[in-house]
């Protein structure tokens, strides 16, 4: 009788252990799925940010082209009239300053896009579990992109 009770108790312990292992495995799978979902959301957010930066960069390029055209027209007008009006010269200087500002802005945006792409790659490597590659990439880009974050 006592051995039957021991067998029943041992059977319940084994079933309980198997149930606990199953629950742990399901929790791990769910945690991995949640981590992958978060990584996917992060990728989408970064891609949207990159698209916004690209749109802003395109807009800056279009404004730059318009200012260059304006400068050419001013040069043509100045050559035809052979008179440099003080107001025309001031407009030209302002257009040149605006053009330089836009070029500077575009260069910053291009760098920001590059850094966003590197961050996205670091995050993707981290999501895949390739933390060594992620850390190596992050260390290579730390100087040009000081705001890079570790994969996680």
Image (tube, grey):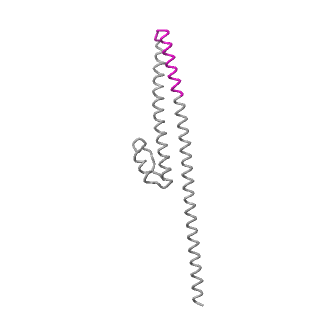
The count of marks equals 0
Seen at 55% across and 38% down, the residue is 52
Of all residues shown, which one is farthest toward the bottom?
1
Q: Is residue 93 magenta?
A: no
Q: State which quarter of the image contains the N terminus.
A: bottom right
Residue 88, placed above or below residue 115: above
Residue 68, placed above or below residue 109: above
Residue 71 lies, in percent from the top left, at 49, 19
Residue 57 lies, in percent from the top left, at 52, 33
Which span is picked out in magenta? 62-84
Seen at 60% across and 83% down, the residue is 8
Between 7 and 89, the residue placed more toward the observer is 7
Residue 48, placed above or below residue 89: below
Between 132 and 116, the residue placed more toward the observer is 132
Residue 76 lies, in percent from the top left, at 50, 14
Q: Is residue 67 magenta?
A: yes
Q: Main secondary structure of the magenta part?
A: helix
Seen at 50% across and 13% down, the residue is 77
Residue 95 lies, in percent from the top left, at 48, 22
Seen at 41% across and 50% down, the residue is 136
């Amino acid at each position: 009788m006592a051995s039957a009770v021991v067998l029943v108790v041992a059977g319940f312990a084994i079933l309980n252990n198997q149930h606990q292992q199953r629950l742990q495995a399901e929790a791990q799978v769910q945690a991995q799925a949640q981590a992958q979902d978060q990584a996917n959301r992060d990728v989408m957010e970064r891609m949207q940010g990159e698209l916004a930066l690209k749109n802003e960069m395109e807009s800056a390029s279009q404004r730059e082209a318009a200012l260059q055209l304006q400068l050419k027209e001013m040069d043509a007008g100045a050559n035809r009239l052979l008179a440099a009006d003080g107001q025309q010269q001031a407009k030209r200087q302002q257009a040149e300053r605006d053009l330089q500002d836009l070029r500077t802005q575009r260069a910053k945006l291009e760098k920001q896009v590059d850094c966003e792409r590197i961050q996205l790659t670091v995050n993707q490597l981290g999501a895949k579990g390739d933390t060594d590659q992620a850390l190596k990439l992050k260390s290579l880009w730390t100087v040009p992109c000081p705001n890079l974050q570790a994969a996680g």
